[in-house]
Amino acid sequence: MSNLIEWVKERNIDEVECLLPDMSGIARGKILPTQKFIDGLGDRGLRVPECLFIQTVTGDFVFETDVVADTNKDIAMVPDPNTIRLVPWYPEPVAQVICDAFHLNGKPVDISPRYLLRRILELYAKKGLRPVVAPELEFYFVKKNLDPDYPLEPPIGASGRQESGRQAYGIEAANEFDPIVEDIYDFCEAANLDVDTMAHEAGAAQMEINFNHGDPLELADQVFLFKRLVRQAALKHDIYATFMAKPHQHQPGSSMHIHQSLVDMYTGRNVFATKSGKDSKTLLHYIGGLQRYLPAAMPLMAPNVNSYRRIARYSDAPINVHWGHDNRTCGLRVPDSSPQARRIENRLAGSDANPYLAMAATLACGYLGMKEKIEPSNPVEGDAYRFAFALPRNQGDALHKFNYAKPLKDTLGENFSRAYMDVKNHEYDLYQRVISSWERENLLLNV
């Protein structure tokens, strides 16, 4: 931890934000004066209650779970020195650092999303393989909305007009939000986030950011921090940025596509391609695992009730797990690429997904495919929307599928799987109590 102490002292840091990503990908933790942070680095002094990991997206605690026996028991936050960065939106020097969670006896908290991703990566390391990922993250700029019953609207751009949508890759449409985008890039540079290109997507004021490929844990950290950063950049301009999967009724949803490949740890060779440049058996078995297990893994790809509004036919989101070469109508796409860059793109996850869990889930499904030598279906040519809907249609169905996918749950870990189910079932129960405006509009006087 000496490197951390040296880092904060060299930059005259006033405060340190110690961050723990919870089940929903929300930043929990503590904000400490620098000296308190330094003092807490010894003897596991940075502590929070373990029940942080059974907190729902609404802020409620699922106290009825049996995964956490003592909900008031402390755990230790242990900062990962590789993740310390400046918080770029504060005028004074403030640092942020992502922490791992440990019990006070030194054992990792196995229901922590960050630990889960580490655990899946260890399974690959035992096979001599190193996963490489590159996420693509979509989000919307929206006008400030203080009434949750009122539909969201696009913000006013530089032209003084609201965009109506369908301006995919439009340069002038993107230019409408240049001041915000410039702040995003400046914030990313200050926070040492390795983002690549940004483009306008198909929705009104919808943007997409591409991340450079790299280690899954590092990329999950970057997506986690990027979401905080974008929301702050938007607030600076008096608008919101949202990563809801489907914020607008008549606009496309927002995804988090995950490109993934596997590299031999000893030779550096991409094992998804043969020496002659063709798709390898490893890639095909990996795709077979995605096809078999991703429908059951959807609670980690589409974690909220709103997530399933995005999964609709001809909506720029997939409805099944068919695969194809350079076919964007499929849930799984193998882009046209050189053998060194051969990869599979998982197009199922929404931008509202916890990046640690989405990456852990897709890698776990591929791992099972290789372990069980699952043969994939034939690649699809043409429109994959012509095939049947094969994904869960709502959160309840998704949780039911996950509950009965024993190989997947065993791979993710029994404790984590039970804790996640308890949190998400509790959220679904809370949602089921809400009477929507659609019900009042269409049922109040008609039935």
Image (cartoon, rainbow, N blue to C red):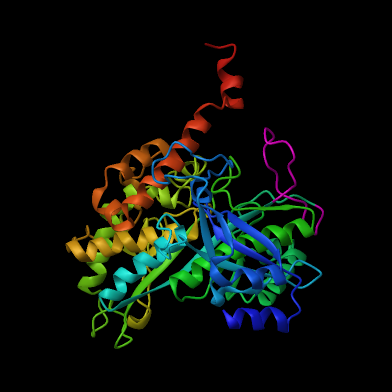
Q: Nearer the viewer, residue 170 or 207?
A: 207
Q: Residue at x 59, y 14 (%)?
A: 444
**Residue 308, relative to residue 365: is it above or below?**
above
The x and y percentages for residue 89 are 75, 66
State left or right for residue 120 relative to residue 55.
left
**Residue 49, relative to residue 439: is it above or below?**
below
Q: Nearer the viewer, residue 200 or 390?
A: 390
State left or right for residue 395 relative to residue 12.
left
Q: Residue at x 49, y 43 (%)?
A: 304
Q: Residue at x 67, y 32 (%)?
A: 149
* Whether residue 320 can be seen here: no
Residue located farthest toward the bottom when viewing the structure as drawn: 267
Q: Residue at x 49, y 60 (%)?
A: 355
- Answer with the quarter of the image where residue 241 lies: bottom right
State left or right for residue 53 relative to residue 33.
left
Give the total of numbered labels.
Answer: 0
The x and y percentages for residue 167 are 62, 57
Q: Is residue 353 magenta?
A: no
The x and y percentages for residue 439 are 56, 22
Q: Nearer the viewer, residue 143 or 371?
A: 371
Q: Which residues are magenta?
A: 142-160
**Magenta: predominant secondary structure element?**
loop
Quarter of the image containing the N terminus?
Answer: bottom right
* Whether residue 2 can be seen here: yes
The x and y percentages for residue 250 are 58, 41
